[in-house]
Amino acid sequence: MTNDDEVFFVLLTGGLFFGLGLIFILGQLYLACFQLKKIIDHLSNSHGVLLRKTVMRQGVFGVYFMLISVGAFFVFPSKSIKCGNLDRNDYLNFPRGLLNLIRLFYVAGLGGGVAMFVLFFGGKYMGWIE
């Protein structure tokens, strides 16, 4: 039998997982449909984007791969600039509103992933998952 604390734990972590995941998915759709050309144009000197541009011709999964890569570049910019995937001038001249929006969507995705693992390991600890 479950107690109130267990129900609260499941509702909180499960709600975080689904809520943040929904924000991430809707954000991906918004970026892919309305902002992709602007993103590609502003990152024209970045080596990582130029390498992945050919993959975009392969349909929805290519566009998704490009957006995931750009999101990783912007969530961890110092590492991306150091590795040569992101051009420093492109990063500094990128529109701040769009940059913050991309970061928001990808941090929400990372938070949803963390909530998923917390829910999984909490369920194992409580004996719900064998």
Image (spheres, rainbow, N blue to C red):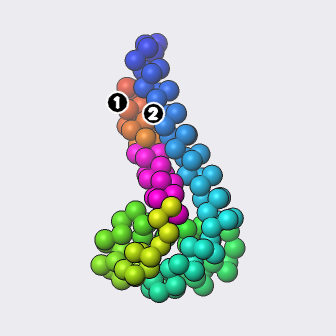
Please determine whether, in this image, residue 127 is positioned above or below residue 87.
above
Please determine whether, in this image, residue 127 is positioned above or below residue 80.
above
Over which residues does the magenta segment extend? 98-114
At x 64% / y 59%, what residue is drawn? 30
At x 36% / y 65%, what residue is drawn? 76
Judge the density around disc 1: few (<14), some (14-19), many (≥20) Cα neighbours within 10 Å: few
Corner quadrant of residue 116: top left
Going by the image, does 119 lie left or right of 65?
Answer: left
As for residue 122 lying within the magenta part, the answer is no
Q: Amino acid at mark 1?
A: Tyr
Q: CA distance from mark 1 to mark 2?
A: 14 Å
Q: How many marks?
A: 2
Given this view, does label 1 or label 2 mark the residue nearer the observer? 2
- Residue bearing mark 2: 13
As for residue 104 lying within the magenta part, the answer is yes
Query: Where does the image place residue 69, in percent across and percent down from the top left?
Result: 49, 70
- Mark 1 secondary-structure assignment: helix
Please determine whether, in this image, residue 110 is positioned above or below residue 118.
below
Residue 129 shows up from this direction: no
At x 59% / y 45%, what residue is drawn? 22
Query: Where does the image place residue 91, in percent across and percent down from the top left?
Result: 41, 75
Going by the image, does 23 lie left or right of 127?
Answer: right
Query: Where does the image place residue 48, in percent across and percent down from the top left?
Result: 46, 81
- The quarter of the rendered structure image containing the C terminus is top left
Query: Where does the image place residue 2, in percent across and percent down from the top left?
Result: 45, 15
Q: Amino acid at mark 2?
A: Thr
Residue nearer the viewer, 106 or 45: 45
Helix, strand or loop: magenta stretch: helix
- Residue bearing mark 1: 125
- Mark 2 secondary-structure assignment: helix
At x 38% / y 32%, what residue is drawn? 122
Please determine whether, in this image, residue 5 is positioned above or below residue 102.
above
